[in-house]
């Protein structure tokens, strides 16, 4: 059934402007398909909003409806999440979402709440818009750069930024909370945020945008900032795809440090990556990232396809994919969980603290490292930041599944007689998601032509309280490796090799 548009609603293009009109339309019971929404023509004065700083987050109240129209309902009750979703999506710039917002609100107030869900067609669009706005808000906070201004009559700091959506007010609110009494302004093509030390005003776009942009581009203190930025750059952690994703080129023009990026990338591509830290930082006293060349096995070149693997999202935050290491002719394959912090930087398996425990266990078992093939169920480091540290995070089953292709490739290439699964993740990667470490430990199992043995992950020894517990874990791993080595020997004898 097609409905002729019966009314045009003109909206001051803000959430408050839409909300005012939407409440009027709801009170009048105007169905969404009978309405056409459009932005109010530009009115400089109407665009001025003074944010009440004492109560941030309050919305301007809906104004009294036009004379002759039914009164707005005293309250339209929606859940907090829904209100938040509407507010975020309302900041989407192109196309303006007014009709969509009203349709979802209409459905909600008529008992159909599916529109709030991302599984619904309208809901999916709403969520996608809200997500784009959140991203833009986040980017604005991350990429606005204030410069000191010496021009008379200007605030102390000025910045120029070009957001995609109407996130200026929210982002300015963020800066107002963090920059104390220093005065500043942020110019954008669509509005100006001005903080005078105690109140925030969002007004029309700056009349003299060019002058503001020029002010925002000159600051002697920037040389210092660039020096600092350069010194924090770590070529070993450079992930160009992630860099471009996190700091898209479109932001570079506003970032003083961006001019340095191309040369730093070139530097990393031409070998600096292996230093693990920028040369300047590496030369400073402090804790270096230790890569024990004795223990580390000769590095197999990273297969281009593995390092380029995008089958899950872990590559985004990892330095590089870490392939397995060892002889293709090895009879025993040890499978760990995933590279840790050290492994991620060096591109080699088991060279960090868990690797030291493993070495201890191998020594107890009397099995040299180079007799084995060592690899992981997941090839990229999954971590969360805690302060300045990157803390290991257990990979999810979907990440294990996504990476199983690489483990399969290693199993087919090496064709080990015995596989030792170090820990629950490795066991699940090899024997399936239902396999339980406690049930499998100490019981060699047949896996096609190979034996599968399960034991602790070496990092469990690092977490185990006390020397006794640690010793038991090391001994457990040593037993499994020794048993595996024996089984491999007897399997070869039986096969006449
Ligand atoms: N833990 C693992 O499972 N593998 C490594 O390579 C390092 C730590």
Image (cartoon, helix red, strand yellow):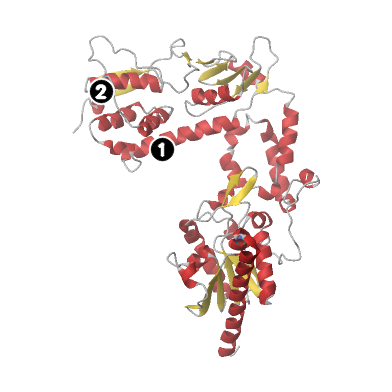
Q: Name the spot of residue 481 as percent of width and height, x first.
A: 61, 75
Q: Badge 2 is on which residue? A: 26
Q: Name the residue under label 1.
A: 128
Give me the residue at 32% from left, 22% from top: 37
Q: Where is residue 457 in the image (x, y as percent from the top left)?
A: 58, 65
495 over 427 or under it: above or below:
below
Residue 16 position, x and y percent, is 39, 20
Mark 1 or 2 closer to N-term?
2
Residue at x-position 56% and y-position 89%: 494
Q: Quadrant of ligand 1?
A: bottom right
Circle 2 residues within 10 Å: few <14, some 14–19, many ≥20? many
Name the residue furthest left: 1
As rendered, which of 7 and 202 lies closer to the eye? Answer: 202
Gap in angstroms between the C-alphas marked 1 and 2: 25 Å
Residue 398 vertical position relative to residue 445 in the rendered view, above or below: above
Mark 1 or 2: the one toward you: 2
Along the viewing direction, whichever of 96 and 338 lies nearer the viewer: 338
- Name the image quarter holding residue 246: top right
| Residue 151 lies in quadrant | top right
Q: Is mark 2 on a helix, strand or loop?
A: helix
The C terminus lies in quadrant: bottom right
On the picture, is 4 further left or further right than 333?
left
Do tag 1 and tag 2 residues touch (Cβ < 8 Å)?
no
Picture coordinates of residue 226, whole percent (x, y):
72, 33
Residue drawn 56% across and 13% down? Answer: 207
Q: In which quarter of the image is the N terminus?
A: top left
């Amino acid at each position: 059934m097609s409905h002729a548009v019966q009314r045009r609603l003109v909206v001051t293009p803000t959430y408050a402007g839409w909300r005012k009109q939407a409440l009027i339309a709801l009170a009048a019971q105007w169905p969404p398909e009978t309405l056409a929404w459009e932005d109010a023509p530009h009115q400089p004065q109407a665009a001025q909003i003074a944010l009440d700083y004492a109560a941030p987050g309050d919305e301007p109240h809906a104004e009294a409806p036009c004379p002759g129209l039914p009164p707005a309902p005293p309250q339209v009750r929606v859940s907090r999440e829904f209100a938040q979703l509407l507010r975020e999506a309302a900041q989407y710039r192109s196309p303006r979402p007014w009709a969509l917002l009203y349709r979802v609100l209409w459905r909600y107030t008529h008992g159909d709440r599916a529109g709030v869900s991302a599984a619904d067609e309208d809901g999916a669009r709403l969520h996608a818009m809200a997500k784009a706005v959140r991203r833009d808000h986040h980017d604005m906070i991350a990429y606005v750069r204030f410069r000191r201004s010496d021009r008379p009559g200007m605030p102390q700091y000025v910045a120029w930024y070009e957001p995609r959506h109407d996130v200026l007010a929210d982002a300015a609110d963020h800066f107002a909370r963090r920059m104390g009494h220093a005065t500043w302004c942020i110019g954008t093509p669509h509005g100006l945020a001005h903080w005078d030390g105690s109140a925030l005003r969002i007004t029309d776009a700056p009349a003299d945008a060019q002058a503001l942009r020029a002010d925002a581009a000159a600051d002697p203190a920037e040389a210092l900032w660039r020096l600092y930025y350069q010194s924090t750059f770590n070529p070993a952690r450079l992930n160009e795809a992630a860099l471009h994703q996190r700091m898209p080129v479109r932001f570079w023009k506003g970032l003083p440090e961006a001019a340095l990026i191309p040369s730093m990338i070139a530097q990393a591509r031409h070998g600096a990556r292996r230093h693990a830290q920028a040369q300047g930082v590496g030369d400073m006293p402090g804790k270096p990232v230790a890569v024990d060349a004795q223990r580390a096995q000769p590095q197999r070149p990273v297969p281009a396809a593995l390092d380029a693997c995008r089958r899950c999202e872990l590559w985004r935050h990892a330095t590089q994919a870490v392939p397995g290491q060892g002889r293709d002719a090895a009879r025993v394959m040890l499978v760990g969980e995933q590279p840790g912090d050290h492994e991620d930087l060096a591109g080699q398996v088991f060279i960090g603290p868990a690797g030291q425990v493993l070495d201890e266990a191998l020594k107890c078992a009397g099995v040299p490292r180079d007799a084995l093939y060592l690899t992981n169920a997941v090839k990229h480091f999954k971590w969360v930041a805690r302060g300045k540290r990157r803390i290991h995070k257990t990979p999810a089953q979907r990440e294990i599944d996504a990476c199983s292709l690489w483990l399969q490739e290693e199993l087919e290439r090496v064709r080990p007689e015995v596989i030792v699964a170090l820990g629950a993740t490795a066991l699940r990667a090899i024997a399936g998601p239902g396999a339980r470490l406690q049930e499998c430990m100490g019981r060699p199992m047949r896996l096609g032509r190979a034996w599968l043995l399960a034991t602790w992950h070496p990092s469990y020894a690092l977490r185990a309280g006390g020397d006794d517990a640690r010793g038991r874990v090391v001994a457990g791993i040593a037993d499994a490796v020794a048993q595996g080595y024996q089984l491999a020997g007897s399997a070869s004898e039986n096969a006449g090799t």
